[in-house]
Image (cartoon, helix red, strand yellow):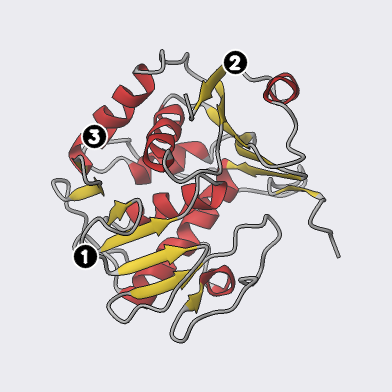
Amino acid sequence: MPHATDRVNFTHSALDVVAVPRLDPVTSAMPLPGLLSRLTTEARPRMTWYSGEERAELSGHVLDNWVTKVANFLVEEYQAGPDTRVALDLPVHWRTVVWAMAVWRVGACLVPAPGSGRVHVHVSDHPVDRKDVNVVALGLPVLARVFDGELPPGVVDATTAVMTYGDVLTWMPEPDPIGPAVETPDQTVRFDQFVAWADSVLESHGGIERGARVLLDGAGGREQQVQALALIFAVYLRDGSVVLRAPAPGTPSADRIAQTELVTKRIDLAG
């Protein structure tokens, strides 16, 4: 049984036979399906996470599998689609990236935290009992298979539930290109504006070369969630990969991680 301090690599073994997926076009109207298919074409890390003694690494194929499981969960449990608003009350974390992509995969709208108006599904790592919304608990430790805490009545433990869903998409709702993808108190970004929006956030940090290995330092907070998601999406659009570093006790320094992970661009989320 692995310990919580073990380094977990979610990439496939060299002996695994993985079918090469059809390359869906990355359209400006609904970019996520095509983007995910392109991320799976090479067996290399697309997401690496550091926090304390935790290190997790996800290939594009594994990232796509996680997104698929969560998308199936959202559709089957909550009929999520273009009219659904999903609050991700979560810090910047690799699991948050998975859930955000799943929300967009089903055509739903992501809101970063409570207080952004009415929501249909509220996903949180510190769930509370709410009668007006479907509350979903999510455990964040890298090896978590159940939520490590008390679940209020009616709250679903997605840490466990998502693992029961398949790696192949079931029925997905018809997307709405002019529907909202992200909604904050300051802005609303439609799906057909999403690529340009993500690009503009990345360009505000100086841009990157294609295939860059980008370290996002200062993960683990909540205030930078939307900024971080936009940056990650833009990096993936450029066939890059992301390293997330949370400033928890025991986390290796940014300099050490940058050297170990062959980082070519550093962005300080807090700066």
Instruction: Inspect the image, locate mark 3, and give the three-letter code of the amino acid beneath it.
Output: Ser
Find residue 160 and report its image quarter: bottom right
Residue 244 visible from this viewpoint: yes
Residue 216 lies, in percent from the top left, at 54, 29
Residue mark closest to the camera, 3 vs 1: 1
Would you place residue 119 above or below residue 101 in this image? Answer: below
Residue mark closest to the camera, 3 vs 2: 2
Q: Which residue is mark 2?
A: 264
Q: Residue furthest left?
A: 178
Q: Quadrant of the N terminus?
A: bottom right
Mark 3 → mark 1, Cα distance in angstroms = 27 Å
- Crowding around mark 3 (Cα neighbors within 10 Å: few <14, some 14 to 19, many 20+) is some
In the rendered structure, the answer to whether residue 197 lies left or right of residue 45 reads left
Residue mark closest to the camera, 1 vs 2: 1
In the rendered structure, the answer to whether residue 14 lies left or right of residue 29 reads right
Instruction: Inspect the image, locate mark 2, and give the three-letter code of the amino acid beneath it.
Output: Thr
Does label 1 or label 2 sit earlier along the sequence? Answer: 1
Residue nearest the observer in this picture, 198 or 62: 198
Residue nearest the observer in this picture, 1 or 118: 118
Query: Element under label 3?
Result: loop
In the rendered structure, the answer to whether residue 112 lies left or right of residue 67 reads left
Residue 212 visible from this viewpoint: no
Q: Which residue is mark 1?
A: 118
Q: Residue at position x 42%, y 67% from top?
A: 72
Q: Residue at position x 59%, y 64% from top?
A: 139
Mark 1 → mark 2, Cα distance in angstroms = 40 Å
Q: Which residue is mark 3?
A: 28
